[in-house]
Image (cartoon, rainbow, N blue to C red):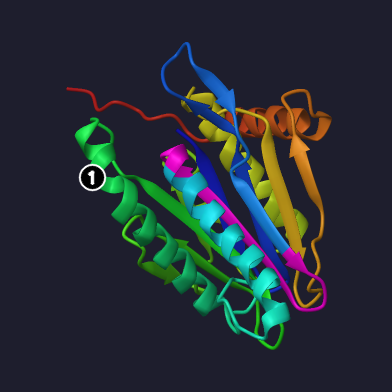
C-alpha cells in the first residue's frame, strides 16, 4: 500500500509520498513514488503514484518515452506530443489519463486473468508559464478532478488515517512550511496506524511563479525534525485530551 498527498496553496504546492511497496509481510521494498519534470523558467510538473506498481511505472515510462521521442523528432521539424509540449496543466492531466488508458488496454485483461486488479491513481501538480499552479487527482479510469479553494488537497492510497488533520487545518493561505508540517503530521498518524505505509518519505515544496524546483528531501526514520514533530504532536494530543472535561455517566 502507499500514501501520497498534494496540497495547493496561494504560495505554491506541497507534495509528499511514502516509499514502501509490499506483496506480503515478508516481501517489502522501497520504490520512489514521486516523479518530477522540470524545464526552468517554463514548467515544473510533479506526479505522485499509488496502486499497482507495474501499472504506475508503465504510465511514467510512457510519459518519459514521449518526451524522448519529441527530442528525437525535433531535428526533423515534426511534433510529438509530450508533457513538455502541453500549454496547460489541464492538457498534462489529459495526457496522463490517456497513458493510463493505453496501459489498461495492453495489460488490464492479463492482470485480471492473473488475479490482480488494474489499480493506479495519481496526484498531478505543477505550474506552466502563464497560468497559476494547479493540482489534479487522476483515477485508474483516466478521468480526473481539480483542486479548488474549497478542496485544496488530494490524497491517494491509505489516506483515511491522515485525512482528519488535513481536514481541520489545511487552508489556501498557509505558508509552505505550515503546509509541510500538516502533511508530515498526516503521515505520522498514518504510519502509527498502518504498517503497509512506511518511511522514508519524499517531500517537495514548490514556490509559486518560480518555475523551478524548490526544496526536495527524503525524510528517514531517524530524521530529527520528524522525531520532534511526532513527539510534540503526541504530547499535544494527550494534553488536549486531559484538558477536556470527562464524561459523567448518568445515575439511575
Could you tell whether 23 is left or right of 62 in the image? Answer: left
Residue 96 sits above or below residue 203 on the image? below
Left or right, residue 112 beside residue 12: left
Of all residues, the one furthest to the top in this rendering is 26
Q: Residue at x 61, y 84 (%)?
A: 78
Image spot of residue 149 (x, y percent):
53, 74
Q: Quadrant of the C terminus?
A: top left
Q: Is residue 190 magenta?
A: no
Tell me where the magenta segment starts and ends, as one range: 38-54
Residue 39 magenta: yes
Name the element at disc 1. Answer: helix
How would you classify the magenta stretch by its main secondary structure? strand
At a point 54% along the width and 25% down the height, the residue shown is: 192
Nearer to me, 104 or 180: 104
Can residue 175 be seen here? The reply is: no
Quick check: 72 above or below 34?
A: below
Q: Is 216 displayed left or right of 83 in the figure?
A: right
- Residue 46, horizontal then vertical, whole percent: 64, 60
Amino acid at each position: 500500500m502507499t500514501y501520497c498527498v498534494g496540497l495547493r496553496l496561494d504560495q505554491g504546492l506541497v507534495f509528499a509520498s511514502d516509499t514502501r511497496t509490499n506483496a506480503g509481510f515478508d516481501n517489502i521494498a522501497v520504490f520512489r513514488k514521486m516523479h518530477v519534470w522540470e524545464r526552468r523558467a517554463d514548467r515544473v510538473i510533479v506526479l505522485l503514484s499509488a496502486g499497482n506498481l507495474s501499472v504506475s511505472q508503465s504510465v511514467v515510462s510512457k510519459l518519459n518515452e514521449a518526451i524522448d521521442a519529441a527530442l528525437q523528432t525535433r531535428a526533423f521539424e515534426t511534433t510529438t506530443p509530450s508533457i513538455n509540449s502541453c500549454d496547460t496543466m489541464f492538457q498534462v492531466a489529459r495526457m496522463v489519463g490517456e497513458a493510463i488508458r493505453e496501459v489498461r488496454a495492453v495489460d488490464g485483461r492479463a492482470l485480471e486473468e492473473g488475479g490482480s486488479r488494474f489499480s493506479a491513481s495519481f496526484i498531478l501538480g505543477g505550474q506552466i508559464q502563464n497560468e497559476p499552479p494547479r493540482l489534479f487527482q487522476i483515477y485508474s479510469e483516466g478521468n480526473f478532478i481539480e483542486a479548488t479553494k474549497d478542496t485544496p488537497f488530494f490524497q491517494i492510497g491509505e489516506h483515511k488515517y491522515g485525512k482528519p488533520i488535513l481536514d481541520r487545518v489545511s487552508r489556501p493561505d498557509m505558508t509552505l512550511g505550515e503546509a509541510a508540517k500538516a502533511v508530515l503530521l498526516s503521515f505520522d498518524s498514518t504510519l502509527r496506524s498502518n504498517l503497509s505505509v512506511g518511511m522514508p518519505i519524499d517531500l517537495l515544496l514548490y514556490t509559486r511563479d518560480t518555475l523551478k524546483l524548490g526544496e526536495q528531501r527524503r525524510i528517514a526514520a531517524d530524521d530529527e525534525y520528524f522525531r520532534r514533530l511526532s513527539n510534540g504532536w503526541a504530547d499535544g494530543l494527550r494534553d488536549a485530551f486531559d484538558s477536556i472535561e470527562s464524561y459523567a455517566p448518568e445515575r439511575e
